[in-house]
Image (tube, rainbow, N blue to C red):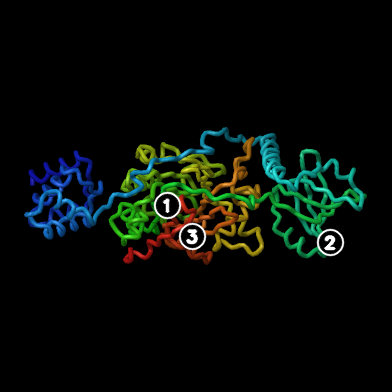
């Protein structure tokens, strides 16, 4: 036994670790020393093995050793032993090309003073007005203070304003209170303009919109058309020379009893090229980036009686468990982690990155990048808007016909609004910073969100909308709400062809 322990120490010195089930296979074999010596022989011949040697790896090595026999040369034997375990991934040879375009971490945060609220909404207004004025059809916009100077019945005018109030009149018309830096005005949408009236039902408070209409002698503005800032119809898709993938995840909820560990470990094995058919292994070998859009852990005290559904009751231990999983991912894959409402970052948007004091193990891994929520990241010239998606709940309750079961339709509405949380004061907490960091100033190539636990993909005006679902089975809350998650589906974004592949790890036995 002493000899075996010495050999195991040699394995550790070479940078390899045995999982408990891998050690059990060795310990309970007929000749433990022979197995460990065989591993050392393979390592000394510079043939790659997975850094974490589990039971499946050890068993495969033993079976391959029996087949190749002693008459083979060491190189031939090593190819027989490792050929089925790991093919050289193409992503290992591709240079890492990441640029953080925006991260709210470290920005000055609000103290809640009244003047900060004023500056916040002024900044929101000016940013979205700039988006409008970049369009050719907006060169005739005037200020609200000028409306009554243009009250002839023939002239149509446009104003860009923030919606301060929205209510129905006694006659069933819609009355809006609009404001810009120059003043306020009451605006009316007649119920008889059915198409316009239907469109107006989806106006949200605090949105910045453009209204076209006519002024009246009664100081009212009669709206005849509404314009949302929206994204360009000319958004161009981008491409990389080399085919490389970004795997998009969210809502792992590690520490929850509902965390689907077996399936997540299957995903990690797939990334390492240990499982799957040849096509799936080829896909895995091109994964260079892994982006997690929030709720890496389940957290503590997020909702009443949460402790009854936790397998890990300390948040630092939850993050340490997360590290133990993520460190098994090949080190040539860069892991980008943004927080969600279950993570130990402040709850108000924008959220800074998960603090190092809770997740120091993640910071020390070497292949992780910790960012806030939202974050804008450039990968091989493609811009990824990464946002956890808490405001999607508010949007589902405010937009007619919207549903949490269709996450990409809600994400599309945020692009149309050009804002990640347009309703201030709803269930989504928002910090009134002097700058509104939730305005979507630059159109992304990929909009990645989570939160709703429903996987969804869609393209809107050449922008990929991807909601990456979850790795948690149905919770008590979801059961009570009638929500059915779609866990363990991994969207892969192809940066060369701007296509999306989805690998379903719930189909455990087929991968």
Q: Can see residue 299? A: no
Would you call the spot at circle 3 few (<14 residues within 10 Å), some (14-19), or many (20 or more)?
many
For marks 1 and 3 on the same chain, the one whose residue lies earlier in the sequence: 1
The residue closer to the viewer here, 223 or 301, is 223
Would you call the spot at circle 2 few (<14 residues within 10 Å), some (14-19), or many (20 or more)?
few
The residue closer to the viewer here, 479 or 361, is 361
What residue is drawn where x is 69% and y is 34%? 115
Residue located beneath label 3 in the image = 455
Q: Position of residue 26 (x, y in %)?
A: 14, 53
Q: Is residue 71 left or right of residue 183?
A: left
Q: Is residue 132 left or right of residue 148?
A: left
For marks 2 and 1 on the same chain, the one whose residue lies earlier in the sequence: 2
The residue closer to the viewer here, 477 or 93, is 93
The local secondary structure at tag 3 comes to: strand
Quarter where residue 94 is shown: top left
Q: Work out how far the residue at label 2 is from the one at label 1, CA to CA, in angstroms.
A: 53 Å
Residue located beneath label 2 in the image = 170
The local secondary structure at tag 2 comes to: loop
Q: Work out how far the residue at label 2 is from the one at label 3, CA to CA, in angstroms.
A: 43 Å
The local secondary structure at tag 1 comes to: strand
For discs 2 and 3, the disc positioned in front in the rendered view? 3
Q: Position of residue 156 (x, y in %)?
A: 85, 51
For discs 1 and 3, the disc positioned in front in the rendered view? 1
What residue is drawn where x is 89% and y is 48%? 219
Residue located beneath label 1 in the image = 247
Q: Position of residue 10 (x, y in %)?
A: 15, 40
Q: Position of residue 182 (x, y in %)?
A: 80, 38
What residue is drawn where x is 44% and y is 47%? 241
């Amino acid at each position: 036994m002493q000899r075996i322990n010495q050999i195991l120490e040699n394995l550790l010195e070479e940078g390899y670790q045995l999982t408990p089930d891998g050690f059990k296979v060795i310990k309970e074999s007929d000749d433990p020393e022979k197995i460990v010596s065989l591993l050392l022989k393979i390592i000394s011949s510079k043939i790659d093995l997975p850094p974490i040697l589990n039971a499946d790896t050890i068993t495969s090595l033993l079976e391959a050793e029996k087949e190749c026999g002693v008459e083979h040369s060491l190189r031939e034997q090593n190819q027989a032993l490792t050929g089925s375990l790991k093919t050289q991934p193409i992503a290992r040879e591709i240079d890492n090309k990441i640029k953080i375009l925006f991260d709210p971490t470290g920005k000055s945060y609000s103290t809640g003073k009244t003047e900060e609220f004023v500056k916040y909404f002024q900044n929101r207004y000016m940013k979205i007005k700039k988006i409008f004025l970049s369009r050719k059809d907006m060169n005739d916009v005037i200020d609200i203070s000028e409306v009554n100077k243009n009250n002839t019945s023939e002239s149509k005018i446009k104003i860009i304003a923030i919606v301060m109030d929205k209510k129905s009149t006694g006659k069933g018309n819609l009355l809006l209170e609009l404001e810009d830096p120059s003043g306020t005005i009451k605006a009316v949408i007649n119920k008889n303009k059915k198409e316009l009236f239907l469109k107006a039902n989806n106006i949200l408070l605090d949105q910045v919109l453009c209204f076209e209409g006519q002024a009246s002698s009664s100081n009212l503005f009669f709206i005849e058309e509404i314009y949302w800032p929206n994204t360009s119809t000319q958004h161009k898709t981008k491409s990389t020379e080399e085919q490389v993938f970004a795997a998009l995840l969210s809502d792992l909820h590690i520490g929850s009893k509902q965390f689907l560990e077996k399936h997540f470990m299957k995903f990690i094995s797939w990334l390492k090229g240990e499982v799957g058919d040849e096509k799936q292994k080829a896909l895995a070998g091109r994964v260079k980036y892994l982006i997690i859009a929030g709720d890496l852990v389940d957290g503590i005290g997020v909702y009443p009686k949460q402790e009854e559904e936790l397998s890990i009751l300390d948040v630092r231990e939850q993050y340490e468990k997360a590290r133990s999983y993520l460190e098994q991912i090949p080190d040539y894959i860069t892991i980008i982690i943004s927080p969600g409402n279950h993570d130990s970052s402040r709850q108000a948007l924008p959220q800074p990155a998960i603090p190092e004091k809770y997740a120091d193990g993640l910071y020390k891994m070497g292949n992780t990048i910790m960012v806030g929520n939202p974050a804008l990241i450039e990968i091989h010239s493609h811009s990824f808007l990464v946002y956890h998606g808490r405001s999607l709940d508010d949007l589902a309750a405010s937009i007619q016909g919207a549903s949490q079961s269709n996450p990409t339709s809600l994400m599309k509405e945020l692009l149309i609004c050009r804002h990640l949380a347009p309703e201030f004061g709803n269930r989504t907490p928002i910090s009134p910073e002097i700058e509104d960091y939730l305005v979507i100033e630059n159109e992304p190539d990929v909009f990645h969100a989570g939160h709703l636990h429903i996987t969804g993909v869609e393209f809107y005006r050449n922008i990929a909308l991807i909601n990456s679902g979850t790795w948690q089975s149905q919770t008590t809350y979801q059961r009570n709400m009638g929500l059915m998650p779609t866990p363990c589906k991994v969207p892969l974004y192809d940066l060369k062809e701007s296509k999306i592949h989805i690998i379903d790890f719930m189909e455990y036995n087929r991968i």
